[in-house]
Amino acid sequence: MTSPNPTITPPAPAAPERKKSALRRHPWRTFFGTVAVLAIAGPIASAASGGASSPAPASKPAASAPAAPAPSSAAAKPAKPAPHYTVSQQQAIGSAQDYLSYQAFSRKGLIEQLSSKYGEGFSRADATFAINHIKVDWNKEAVQSAKDYLSTQHFSRAGLIEQLSSSFGAGFTKAQAIYAVNHVGL
């Protein structure tokens, strides 16, 4: 005698596939978008508050002299309009800051990296604009570059100065190269 076939239950319906949020699909876009908003909102908020972080202490006028009315701060300091950068300029600035966050560059080297077709491909004008609109201590960059070179290769003092200042090397100025070599102990 044969036993009856066991009943086969159909598989449970699969849960609908959830789409990833924009944050999970493009975390870098979200990050850089937030940074851009903060970079724009900071100067605007500072301008709106008159640029001062705390009020100045009030001084007491002399008893014999009548107090003159204080000029309004709006009349004394006209508000500066927020600078208007093109999208390409904003992107070049962000890219320059990204590069400097993980590698030492000379001014010349960073412009080359940003404007090279093998690098970022920005126009030379946008690359130069970006470098002119970020705050960089080029001597500090030269010291870091010297340390990076010494961690992988051996150099004499003259050889490291040449490597740092060569147009085929790091592209720092001679003064920056000497500063760096002095600060790494060569």
Image: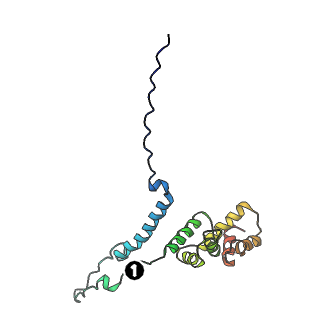
In the rendered view, how is the structure colored?
rainbow
Q: How many marks?
A: 1
For residue 72, what is the image quadrant?
bottom left
Residue that lies at the very extreme toward the front in this rendered image: 1
Number of other residues with Cα within 10 Å of mark 1, as a class: few under 14, some 14 to 19, many 20 or more: few
Residue at 76 percent of width and 66 percent of height? 155
Residue at 41 percent of width and 77 percent of height? 82
Amino acid type at image mark 1: Pro
Instruction: Depth check: give the residue in front, 150 or 116.
Output: 116
Residue linked to disc 1:
81
Using the image, determine if residue 28 lies above or below residue 158: above
Instruction: Depth check: give the residue in front, 186 or 147.
Output: 147
Describe the element under mark 1 as helix, strand or loop: loop
Instruction: State which quarter of the image contains the C terminus.
Output: bottom right
In the rendering, at what x and y percent does residue 6 appear?
46, 20
In the rendering, at what x and y percent does residue 57 appear?
31, 76
Instruction: Depth check: give the residue in front, 60 or 91.
Output: 91
In the rendering, at what x and y percent does residue 142 appear?
65, 71
In the rendering, at what x and y percent does residue 56 appear?
33, 76
